Image (spheres, rainbow, N blue to C red):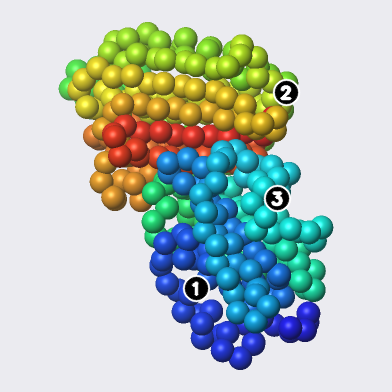
Amino acid sequence: MNEKQDPAAVPGNARWLAEVLTAAAPWSTQAQHAGEFWVRSCGAAAVLFLGIRPEGGFEAVSVRERTDGTTGVDRRLLEGSAGWLLSPERLLALAAGTGLVSGLQLAVHRWPELLSAVIVQGGGSEHLIDAPESLPVTVSRQMLQRASNRGLLIPDENCLEAMAEYAAGAGHEINNPLGSIVGQTQLLLKSEQQLELRQALETIGAQAWRIRDIIGNSMLFARPPRPIPQSLNLIALIRECLAALQVTAREQRVEFRFSAASEELLLQGDRGLLGQLISSLVRNSTEAIRGANRAGRVEIEVRRVATEVAAVAIRDDGPGAGTAEIRRHLFNPFFSGRPAGRGLGFGLSLAWQIVRLHGGLIYAVEPAAGGFIVEIALPV
């Protein structure tokens, strides 16, 4: 096709494109549709989509133009780690090993928040292939967002960004009158002698402070502090976080197990934010086990993925995410699967913000055997 032609204007494309963009389908089907759009409408010679599987490794879907003008589809399972999505070089090496795309004219587009990537082999439409905001890139991303069977729990970035904007505005507006309530309550307590009235004022004050804590967490989620990167040893930082949580864990009959291939894994990051990230995720797992009213175990595993990425897996043998409704809102702030009064639902939403600020990825898996796993990957 002509490089300046709008792919959506090709005869027959508009209706087909409208249908596939509004349909929910398995990830592999969405990847195939997106690949067909690249090849038959945008001039690509071949396209390879890579998506992380719940069982580990990549699911690969390749679409290539045949000599007779039709398209051929190839599906494979490949070895690899989710952390590779942070490394274009690692993805290109993986693609080269398959032979599904080849040549010098290759473009890599990564969507860590969708646990997917696409590698495109050029065919005369270089500006469409390389441009990250081009129509085929946008169409591919929208299709993969509608995948119906990923089996992985992934943050909805658009939803979380909208919530962050709302939380920032609402938090500012609520804080002002709340400060007046707290101040007036404290003032009245100084002069009130009647026991019943003092107890009522103390209750008002305590609940007002609780609201301030919620607002504080919402503001931290909405406008987290900018990271101050420094060289740090991730292994040592995790050990410090676990030591701080150890007493509470023992009281709740929860055992920590930590494993790492070495005693040092250096990266550039904000020590305070990364410490909060690890502590929040471990605390979430501990609370999940506590909610099941039994003893349990939290396993923390750290490994280096090639040379570019540090991967951390936090597993627990608790009851899992629970219902489909809980899974759907898992990363949303103000939503908690635990009983009222046990947490404010900010653990995973704050974790998402911190990971995003460090250029990493985060997702969750609910294994068929039970329990719950949160995986994070951070660039080294």
Which residue is found at the position 64% from the left and 78% from the top?
A: 40
Residue 85 shows up from this direction = yes
Could you give the CA–CA distance between mark 3 and mark 1, rounded to whole angstroms?
30 Å
271 horizontally vs 248: left or right: right
Question: Horizontal and vertical percent for residue 259?
Answer: 50, 16
How many C-alpha atoms fall within 10 Å of the one at disc 1: few (<14), some, or many (≥20)?
Answer: some
Question: Can you say whether 225 is above or below 167 in the image?
Answer: above
Which residue is found at the position 42% from the left and 53% from the top?
A: 150
> Type of residue at label 2?
Gln
**Mark sitting on residue 21:** 1
The one of 17 and 35 positioned closer to us in this rendering: 35
How many C-alpha atoms fall within 10 Å of the one at disc 2: few (<14), some, or many (≥20)?
Answer: few
Residue corresponding to mark 3? 96
Question: Can you say whether 343 is above or below 322 in the image?
Answer: above
Which residue is found at the position 31% from the left and 32% from the top?
A: 371
Evaluate if marks 3 and 1 touch, with contact meaning CB atoms under 8 Å apart.
Answer: no
Question: Horizontal and vertical percent for residue 185?
Answer: 35, 28
Residue corresponding to mark 2? 230
39 horizontally vs 332: left or right: right
SS at badge 2: strand
* Mark before the other along the chain sequence, 3 or 1: 1
Q: Residue 125 occupies which quadrant of the picture? A: bottom right
Question: Horizontal and vertical percent for residue 166?
Answer: 49, 52
> Type of residue at label 3?
Ala
Figure label count: 3
